[in-house]
Image (cartoon, grey):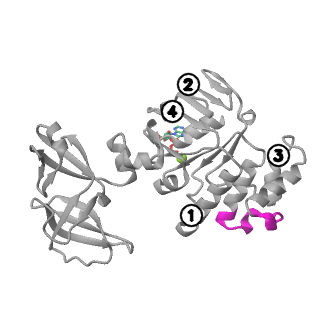
Amino acid sequence: MTLLELKQITKKYSQADQFAVNNVSFSVEKGEILALVGESGSGKTTLLRLIAGLEHPDDGYISLAGNKIVEGKKSVPANKRNVGMVFQDYALFPHLTLLENVLFGLKGKVQNPKNVAKDTLNLVGLSENVKKYPHQLSGGQQQRVALARAIAPGPAILLMDEPFSNLDAVLKDQVREEIRLIIKETQTTALFVTHDTRDALSTADRIAILHKGYLQQIDTPRNLYEFPENGYVANFFAKQNEILATSTDDGFYSTFGFLSDERSKLFSNQVRLSFRTESAVVGKNDTQAMSGKLVKSTYFGDHQLLKIADEEGRFITIRANANRIYERQSVIFFSIEKFMVEEA
Ligand code: ADP
Ligand code: MG
């Protein structure tokens, strides 16, 4: 069942010369976690604020749980929209205890607000700390208070802006999983904004990618990674290698060698082959037809990246097993298992 639907949402701030959000349409299913990803300035926060009712679009339509909340110039005010919001800096009240923070949004909305607040803090694992103040908590705990405050009134949808960006790397993996479990346990529908592809890939059921205010693609993490619809989406998840090649009857010929592939029949001239670092396989011997000279290897513990040059000094980077040591300037043989072909 569709819970949130956006149709052709467009927004330009009065001082700006570019549209912050441009003709964006998508929907979110009940119970789903959708991640909205994009570079800084791509319109993520604006889109979230438009859904929350903190901004009004120039054009478009939004419905939430069967109610039209935005239609043309008409709009339901933010406090009547039944959305829960977690802000990037958590925006907790420093002079209120955790319990008071969560109670704040509940007055007049539920019966027995105190019980609901306590239950929700219990749910996020903070029942021991209800009398503490925000500054007495770790970043991850403050995050959970903000989450408790947002979900306590039982909103139709939970909106979170960069919820993991203030956490250090170690804490982040753990908090991300905790938050995901709480959202799923409470069967909350959630939309969160992030610029970090790892957050999105690991936490979301589906991901929407924004670029310069335009929606590029919306799909499951696996489909976006494996079947990107354009070069922007492909590069967004992991920088792609690009090689120029000439198509022949049975493959592509490049400065790194020959790559046998049936798709060559579809192209008559110069092509651009693009592939990810992990799509190349390093060979033990010279049975593989592609090769180049090792310029540099970078060790990452669980893998290493080999930077390889052709005779003309063009580079590609491929991923290899961490346990083998390759000499600089040695010839590395490899094959490419999966790649995209485009007319150059
Ligand atoms: P993101 O959250 O993806 O970083 P934003 O939605 O904050 O992007 O911003 C999208 C674009 O709108 C940017 O070009 C930004 O500079 C502009 N913008 C955001 N807020 C305002 C504002 N209040 N007034 C004018 N321009 C704004
Ligand atoms: Mg933002």
Q: Position of residue 241 (x, y in %)?
A: 26, 54
Helix, strand or loop status at disc 1 = helix
Determine the CA span between mark 4 and mark 3: 36 Å
Q: Amino acid at mark 1?
A: Lys
**Number of numbered discs visible in the structure rendering:** 4
Which range is magenta?
126-141
Q: Quadrant of the C terminus?
A: top left
User: What residue is shown with label 1?
Assistant: 172
Q: Amino acid at mark 3?
A: Leu
Determine the CA span between mark 2 and mark 1: 36 Å
Q: Position of residue 258 (x, y in %)?
A: 12, 54
Residue displayed at 75% across by 51% down? 149
Residue displayed at 54% across by 50% down? 204
Q: Quadrant of residue 298?
A: bottom left
Q: Is 202 left, or right, of 73 in this rendering?
A: left
User: What residue is shown with label 3?
Assistant: 106
Determine the CA span between mark 4 and mark 1: 36 Å
Helix, strand or loop status at disc 4 = loop
The answer to which of marks 3 and 1 sits earlier in the sequence is 3
- Mark 4 C-beta closer than 8 Å to ligand 1: yes
Helix, strand or loop status at disc 3 = loop
User: What residue is shown with label 2?
Assistant: 60
Residue displayed at 61% across by 30% down? 56
Instruction: Say few, some or many: other residues with alpha carbon within 10 Å of mark 4 (under 14 / 14 to 19 / 20 or more).
Output: few
Q: Is residue 130 magenta?
A: yes
The answer to which of marks 4 and 1 sits earlier in the sequence is 4
Helix, strand or loop status at disc 2 = strand
The answer to which of marks 4 and 2 sits earlier in the sequence is 4
Determine the CA span between mark 4 and mark 2: 20 Å
